[in-house]
Amino acid sequence: GDSVTQMEGPVTLSEEAFLTINCTYTATGYPSLFWYVQYPGEGLQLLLKATKADDKGSNKGFEATYRKETTSFHLEKGSVQVSDSAVYFCALSGSLEYGNKLVFGAGTILRVKS
Amino acid sequence: EAQVTQNPRYLITVTGKKLTVTCSQNMNHEYMSWYRQDPGLGLRQIYYSMNVEVTDKGDVPEGYKVSRKEKRNFPLILESPSPNQTSLYFCASSPRRTEHNSPLHFGNGTRLTVT
């Protein structure tokens, strides 16, 4: 079945450091790919998405490129801030017969120190 | 303000005592879903609903029930809670999709502890 694998955390960085969170997926067909972010005590919010191969999603300085050849959707940010501390989830949208089901990775905790 | 509202935010209960977690959305979304979040496992879908009176099982439906009598509400029912249902629960909604790329809107979560 469809699945998403994320790098394990927690990831601890100093402010202004470069961030990469790896995400690879297994899916049949052509899924859409998402990054969601969860701030402490809150629900998940969509951070960015890409719907086809080579698409780049971007938002709030974060970027991720849909790489079909490597089945990857790595999240990057050039300079992290303390306010970026959160849990980040990579997800794919599964096959149509299951409605709008999202398949999530396990999540990666990011901690940014000032 | 467009939102998904879950209640309660925190709930501690004992094994076997029936409970309901409510979920309501004010965006006129047709699709609603329940997920549970557990450490190391990410979010797993419990049940979903494509429209009023249309519900279906997700990946981990055992021990849960849902109903969709109105478009805005999608309560999650635990008839006889057990400790392995201790988890963080999220309700989510989205407009009816024609392609599988509509983002979900999530509630703020309900942390359930079953002793």
Image (spheres, coloured by chain):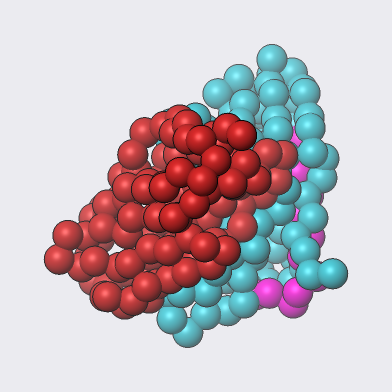
Chain colours: A red, B cyan
Which stretch is magenta? B19-30
In the displayed structure image, the side of residue A65 where residue A109 appears, left or right: right
| Residue found 49% across the figure and 51% down from its top | A79
Q: Is residue B54 visible?
A: no
Instruction: Give how far across and how far down residue B111 sits, in percent.
Output: 70, 33
Give the quarter of the figure containing the C terminus of chain A. Answer: top right
B92 horizontally vs B84: left or right: right
Between B45 and A3, the one nearer to me in the picture: A3
In the rendering, at what x and y percent does residue B42 appear? 47, 40
> Does A104 appear above or below B50?
above
Q: Does residue B86 lie above or below B3 as drawn?
A: above
Residue drawn at 20 percent across, 68 percent down: A68
Q: Residue furthest top?
A: B115
Q: Is residue B58 above or below residue A62?
A: above
Q: In the rendering, at what x and y percent does residue B75 appear?
A: 73, 52
Does the magenta portion include B54? no
Instruction: In the displayed orientation, state which residue is furthest to the left.
Output: A69
The quadrant where residue B72 appears: bottom right
Report whether A17 appears left or right of B49: left
